[in-house]
Image: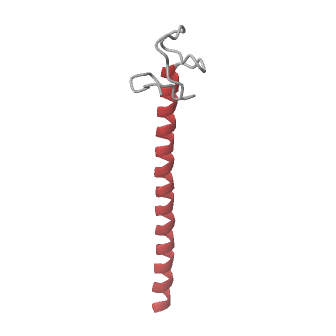
Amino acid sequence: MENNKNKLRCLKCGFYRPEDATNPEWQCPNCLSAYSKIEKYEQNISIFNSEREKAKVLGLTEYFFLVLLNVGLFLFSHQL
């Protein structure tokens, strides 16, 4: 098996750039994508997913707060 430890790996297709590749160094020889564009895309997806998870947590927090508020109001109103 070939040692791919020090080779550049494309994030899009997973191809390891061979030392004898003839295309430009910024481009994956397999899928012809620009490495920098793929990295930027991956970063954007990561940020988007992180923000989406925060929104889900915030949404659940607001939901549980409203449930607790309604339960509290219900119990308070029935004590009178």
Look at the picture and state if 50 lies above or below 17. Answer: below
Dividing the picture into quarters, in which one does residue 4 lie? top left
The residue sitting at the left extreme is: 6
Give the image's coloring scheme: secondary structure
Look at the picture and state if 1 lies above or below 79. Answer: above
Work out whether residue 4 or residue 15 is closer to the camera in this orientation and state it.
4
Residue 7 point in image, percent of width and height: 43, 22
The residue sitting at the front extreme is: 1
Residue 71 point in image, percent of width and height: 49, 79
Residue at (42, 25) in percent of width and height? 3
Work out whether residue 59 or residue 27 is closer to the camera in this orientation and state it.
27
Work out whether residue 35 or residue 59 is closer to the camera in this orientation and state it.
35
Residue 73 point in image, percent of width and height: 48, 80
Residue at (50, 62) in percent of width and height? 60
* Residue 80 in sight from this viewpoint: no
* Residue 26 in sight from this viewpoint: yes
Residue 63 point in image, percent of width and height: 51, 65
Question: Total marks drawn?
Answer: 0
- Is 13 on the left or on the right of 36, as rendered? right
Look at the picture and state if 15 lies above or below 20. Answer: below
Residue at (47, 45) in percent of width and height? 51
The residue sitting at the bottom extreme is: 80
Work out whether residue 61 or residue 74 is closer to the camera in this orientation and state it.
61
